Amino acid sequence: MAVYQLLESNLVPEPLIRMGIRRMLAQKIQEESYPTDTQRKEALAAFVSELRNCPIAIETDAANDQHYELPPEFFTLVLGPWRKYSSGLWAEGVTTLQQAEEAMLTLYCQRADIKDGQTILDLGCGWGSMSLWLATHYPNAKIVGFSNSNGQREFIESECVARGITNLQIVTGNIAEVKDAPAGQTFDRVISIEMFEHMKNYEQLLAKINRWLSPKGKLFVHIFTHKTFAYHYEDTDGTDWLTRYFFTGGTMPSDDLLFHFQEDLAITKHWEVEGTHYQKTANEWLANMHRHRKKILPILAKTYGPENTKKWWVYWRVFFLACAELWGYKHGREWQVSHYLFEKQ
C-alpha cells in the first residue's frame, strides 16, 4: 500500500504517525464494539469456543523470528538494564526505565507470593529479566527459565556466568509441543510474563501448567488486554502491518477472558494496571532507539541486509510508536495490563 511505502521513506513526521495510529485505534474500537452488553457477552462466548478448538499456539516460528531474529545487542541498546521486554511500573517517584523495570519485577514477586527456597518456572522467559531477577534476589530458590529461542538461552547463560549465578537453568522448547515439565520437576510457582498473548487454546495450556505445579503451587500471569473485547491478530486483507511484521498468530485478550478457562486452575486474585505504564515504557524504548541510532543501524543492516536498513529502522520505530499509542489511548483506560493469580482447584 502507498501509505506503507511512504512510511518506509522515513520522511513522515512522528506526530503524523502517532495521529494515524490513533485514528486506526478508534476504528478498531468501533469494529469490535457491540450495541448491547448481551451481544458483547455472546461474541466473547463465541471467541472462547473458538479458542477451545485451536491448537495451544499457532505460527510459533514466525512469532519467534519477528522479535528475536535480532541479536541481544539490539535489545540491550533499546530496553532497560534488565532487558525487560514488557511494561514497566511507573509508580510515584519512578523517573527512569531501570526504576520502572525494577518496580514491576518487585510487584510480580509480591503478587506471585515468591519466597526464597521455592522452585520457580519462568514460562516464556524472554531475555531473562524475571529469571535473573529471581535468581539474584532469591539465592536459595531454584529457577528454571523456559524459552523457544536458543539465542535467548545462550544470552541468559552468559549473563549467569558474568554475574556468578548458579541457581538458574534455561530450557528451550515449543510450549505447544512439550509434555513433561521443564527440567523434569514440579514447581511451587510458575510465572508467565507476556507469553499468553502468543497462545490460543488456554484450556490446554492451563491444564499443562497445572500438571507442572506442586500440590500447593500457584501460577502468576501478566498479559496485556483490552478492557472489554478480545480479538485475534489477523492480516486478512494484507493491510494489518503490525500483525504481518510483529505479532503473527497473536491474541489480544479481554481483561475477563481467562476467567472462562478455570477448569484446572482457579483465579483467586486479579489486578488491572493502567495502560499509561506501558505507554511510558514504549516511549522510553523509542527514545533509546534514537539515542543509540548510530549503533543500531549496523545491527539492522547485518540482520535484514544493507538494502533494508532504513526500512527496518522505520518498522521498529513505528512498532514502538504503535505500542505507546495503543496503551496510551484514552489515558490508558482502553488497552491495559492485567495480572492474575491462579491456584489449584
Image (spheres, rainbow, N blue to C red):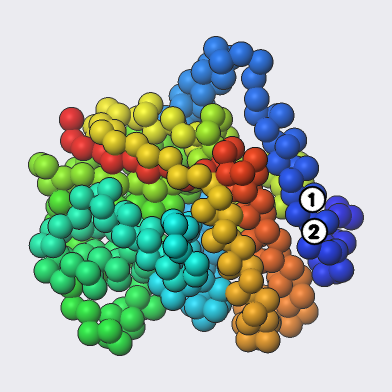
Name the spot of residue 292 as percent of width and height, x first: 63, 82
Q: Residue at x 44, y 62 (%)?
A: 93
Instruction: List the residue tagged with mark 1.
Output: 19
Instruction: List the residue tagged with mark 2.
Output: 15
Residue 273 visible within the image:
yes
**Residues at discs 2 and 1 in contact (Cβ within 8 Å):** yes
Q: Residue at x 28, y 48 (%)?
A: 111
* Viewer-proximal residue among 199 and 286: 286
Q: What residue type is labelled 2?
A: Pro
Q: Residue at x 33, y 83 (%)?
A: 158
Name the spot of residue 308 as percent of width and height, x first: 75, 75
Q: What element carries label 2?
A: helix
Name the spot of residue 280 as percent of width and height, x first: 57, 59
Q: Residue at x 15, y 57 (%)?
A: 115
The image quarter containing residue 9 is: bottom right
Tell me if residue 36 comes above or below residue 124 in the rendering: above
Q: Quadrant of the C terminus?
A: top left
Count of all numbered marks drawn on residues in the image: 2
Name the spot of residue 63 as percent of width and height, x first: 53, 57
* Viewer-proximal residue among 98 and 60: 98
Residue 302 visible within the image:
no
Q: What residue type is labelled 1?
A: Met
Tell me if residue 191 comes above or below residue 38 in the rendering: below
> Label 1 neighbourhood size at 10 Å, few (<14), some (14-19), many (20+)?
few
